[in-house]
Amino acid sequence: MGTYNHIESALIHGGIYGDEKTGAVNTPIYQTSTYMQESLGKHKGYEYSRTGNPTRDALESLIAELEGGKAGFAFASGMAAIAAVLSLFKIGDTVIISSNVYGGTFRILDKVFSHFGISYRIEDTADLNMLETKITPDVKALLIESPANPLLTVTDLAGVARLAKKHGIISIVDNTFMTPYLQRPIELGIDIVVHSATKYLGGHSDLIAGLVVVNSTGLAEQIHFIQNATGGILQPFDSFLLIRSIKTLGVRMDRHVENAVAVADFLKSHESVKQVYYPGLPKSQGYDVNQKQAKNGGAMISFELTEGHDIRTFFSELHLVALAESLGGVESLVCHPASMTHASIPKEIREKVGITDGLIRLSVGIENIDDILNDLKNAIQNSRRNSK
């Protein structure tokens, strides 16, 4: 910890800052696979870059400090990070997941870890009383997203942490949507935090990365073993890019959220919008809980148009906002969860949890707000079935 008290400074100066040998303010890119050893068993702390690399170490130290954890770990993608965390469990174990989570998280549990005898159950984690009744002896972890993807459902993270401790199980939070700038689950008692750093932490749609932060030395030892044994590590150049991007996270997120609030207000009052999902709206689900555990509502919004609109036409009429997978970049992105991010979830499950075919997910970028609003306004207008 440097001579600062606020996260805006920690984003820039946190972790392993600079290079002692040269005085460079940026940690160098150590583009090497191996390291010369002085003699058998005697080295300078590094042997092989799968096990440890100075550039990756700087990133891992930074994310650990930002999340308030014991240790951080960088992976080649968000899914590689999720896979490493799920590798903590064994045959016969069950993981409870939130009722709306990223489709890739569902897919890896449903199609990969199920082969190893690890089961999952989908539950409404926003209802803590009901959730506790679902914690049977086989349940070893609660894997939560809050706000969840794509319906922005809010779960009481401190409450989840208490439940997990009471029952002796692990609490895991995917903090991708909020980042440590807006929400720090470990400070609320959560055991493990996961990020798809591809999103807001990277922030420029130019890298793929995953991060894990743990709250104990025991979990740190286990995750490091899994990281080294399975080898899905983040490369030095991408580690460098991610450190660079995190330095501007605060100013980017402030603009993202400022724009998102304006977009949510616009959609909420539009006659052609049937439903808006955004935890920053005062009457939204979980608003009060989110206010207690997060700085604000973030910059992800989902919504549905009324029946008089053609959703395909809406997407085709957008010209500034790009139809694309992913989120969290400086540019505004829109997607159709049912056919894109959550297509791996069976239709009956999607519909049961509220991910309808008409749901639109919007990642609000940092462009001029008038340009974003005008693009949405024109697309909504032109998607009216009788507008031609």
Image (cartoon, grey):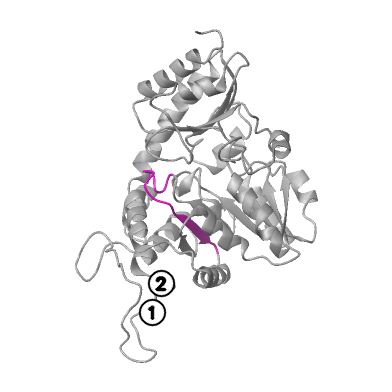
Q: Residue at x 80, y 49 (%)?
A: 133
* Position in image of residue 204 (x %, y %): 36, 43
Q: Residue at x 36, y 53 (%)?
A: 242
- For label 2, the residue is 52
In this view, 35 is above or below 349? below
Q: Amino acid at mark 2?
A: Gly
Q: Amino acid at mark 1?
A: Glu
Q: Are marks 1 and 2 in contact (CB under 8 Å)?
A: yes
Q: Residue at x 48, y 19 (%)?
A: 266
Instruction: Indicate the secondary structure of the residue bearing disc 1.
Output: loop
Was residue 212 drawn as part of the magenta stretch in this picture? yes
User: Label 1 crowding class (10 Å Cα cut-off): few <14, some 14-19, many 20+?
Assistant: some
Say the numbered circle drawn on residue 350. Answer: none
Magenta region's main secondary structure?
Answer: loop
Say the numbered circle drawn on residue 47. Answer: 1
Q: Is residue 9 visible?
A: no
Is tag 1's residue or tag 2's residue first in the polypeptide sequence? 1
Q: In this image, 70 relative to 276: left or right?
A: left
In this view, 307 is above or below 203? above
Q: Residue at x 73, y 35 (%)?
A: 352
Q: Which residues are magenta?
A: 200-215
In this view, 130 is above or below 162? above
Measured in 3D between alpha carbons, the distance from the residue under mark 1 to the one under mark 2, in whole angstroms, is 7 Å
Tell me where residue 281 sits by quadrant: top right
